[in-house]
Amino acid sequence: MQYDVVIVGSGPGGYVSAIRCAQLGLKTALVEKYSTLGGTCLNVGCIPSKALLDSSEHFHNAANNFELHGIEGMAPKLNMTKFIGRKDSVVDATCQGIEFLMKKNKIDVIHGLASILDEKTIQVNGSKKKKISTKNIILATGSKPIELPFAKFDKERIISSTEALKLKEVPKHLIVIGGGVIGLEMGSVYKRLGSQVTVIEYSNSIISTMDNSCGKELSRSLKKLGIKFHLSTKVQKVTRKGDIVKVEGVDLKGNSVSFESDYCLVAVGRGSYTKGLNLEKVGIELDSKGRITINENMQTNKPNIFAIGDVVRGAMLAHKAEEEGVFVAEYIAGQKPHINYDLIPNIVYTWPEVASVGKTEKELKDSGKTYNIGSFPMRALGRSRASTDVDGIVKILSDSKTDEVLGVHIVAARAADLIMEAVVSMEFRASAEDIARICHGHPTYAEAIKEAALDASGKRAIHS
């Protein structure tokens, strides 16, 4: 059978692209090597981690915060089997939803490992070998956790995020190597359940790719939760003896440091995954980081072979991959799509949540741009006090000459949802004054955005 498009990989980039291709009338096939659809995000990433974060937050509140609300009674007891089982049920339902969407949109799903034979042919090695002819190929094979040479995953005690999502017991002490999104989210889960959690980070700040204020605010909150941080610390060796994992390294001053735990989560990032695609045979170019090289239209050096998501440059975010998947589908169909990479939000689902879009203060300083800063503390907000979610801030950076909003950085309850007001505003090149003039409902968390905008456009915040 001849296809218009064959997509390799069924994660958010792949399956969304497949649906958009089908909507545009293109005969579409989706190849997935695993038995379930959804890729890392749905199976061992975004969805299961959020399920565990929500469940652990409920447990933590019941154990520690209900009494503040006048709710008294017996302390909750954790059933780890049900705790992990609920996560599994959420994952199963979500993956089944993707299967339904494939059938609804008449997309052929082929299970097996894909390799490119030539620019128009893909071979799938599954239960049977199958050759597929297509006019276009979209590569969306995602990423895998990075394994450190001195901290090889044994998948029992020295683990990646994949294993952290399905532990059968609560660690007594969880060491997390890496103070980024994955490490902090999983560290939060197990700290809420009763683990001692130690985060070791090479840089001098957690979530170091985001605005510096975000790292400072989140650090305060997670320290109150009980997570311990060792920043500016380089891990050099990780060894296991029985159920004990030993982590050794040096601090900023060159002093040796060592830690012992029963589990060690290595969360230092993810690397593009292209194994088995046979890219070298077709002559597909890779960059120095092993990512597939693409042009502004997501095309590789072979014009009918495209690549999206974690296998190409840019942030490894599910929503970025989705936008790229739609872009390629529309480009193949002859349309002229567009993605504004400056306005792709970055989110951390700890509590409080962290969300950011646009330029950081450091980026503006480095570029020589003059800017205004507006900020507002969440603890000054009536809605935050009502829910006891008083940690965090909203920070708005605006052009000092035009007042255009250049960056918004939020640490707050529901920051993941609040950031979208900033994204929409910035897409239409709103000024801080524009946001400040919009009537925000009361009492809401979103009022903090209005107050920060008032502060940025003339130090006019009402409630601080």
Image (tube, rainbow, N blue to C red):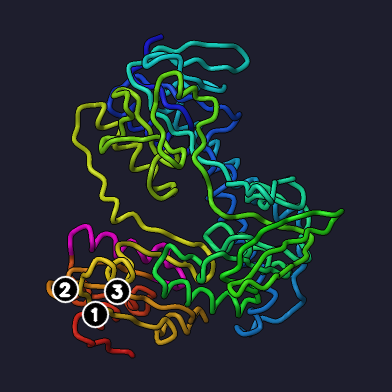
Which stretch did the figure color magenta? 410-429
Could you tell whether 448 is left or right of 220 in the image? left
Disc on res. 356: none
The answer for how far apart the CA atoms under marks 1 and 3 are is 7 Å
161 up-or-down from 54: above or below = above
What amino acid type is highlighted by mark number 1?
Ala
- Considering the image in quadrants, where does the C terminus appear? bottom left
What amino acid type is highlighted by mark number 3?
Ile
Q: Which residue lies under the disc numbered 2?
A: 403
Q: Answer whether residue 422 is magenta in the image.
A: yes
Query: Is disc 1 in contact with disc 3, using a CB cutoff of under 8 Å?
Result: yes
- Considering the image in quadrants, where does the N terminus appear? top left
The answer for how far apart the CA atoms under marks 1 and 2 are is 8 Å
Q: Which residue lies under the disc numbered 3?
A: 396
The answer for how far apart the CA atoms under marks 3 and 2 are is 11 Å
- Residue sticking out furthest to the front: 254
Q: Which residue lies under the disc numbered 1?
A: 456
Instruction: Please tell me in which quadrant of the rendered image residue 454 appears.
Output: bottom left
282 up-or-down from 368: above or below = above
Instruction: Tell me if mark 3 has few (under 14), some (14-19) or many (20+) residues whose alpha carbon lies within 10 angstroms of its own.
Output: many
- Residue at 38 percent across and 23 percent down: it is 137
Instruction: Provide residue 119's location: percent of width, then percent of height.
Output: 37, 17
Instruction: Provide residue 35's location: percent of width, then percent of height.
Output: 61, 29
Instruction: Please tell me in which quadrant of the rendered image residue 376 appears.
Output: bottom left
Q: Nearer the viewer, residue 108 or 222?
A: 222
Instruction: Tell me if mark 1 has few (under 14), some (14-19) or many (20+) residues whose alpha carbon lies within 10 angstroms of its own.
Output: many
Query: Is disc 1 in contact with disc 2, using a CB cutoff of under 8 Å?
Result: yes
Principal secondary structure, stretch drawn in magenta: helix
Question: Mark 1 or mark 2, which has the lower sequence index?
Answer: 2
- Residue at 27 percent across and 89 percent down: it is 462
Question: Mark 3 or mark 2, which has the lower sequence index?
Answer: 3
Instruction: Provide residue 245's location: percent of width, then percent of height.
Output: 78, 58
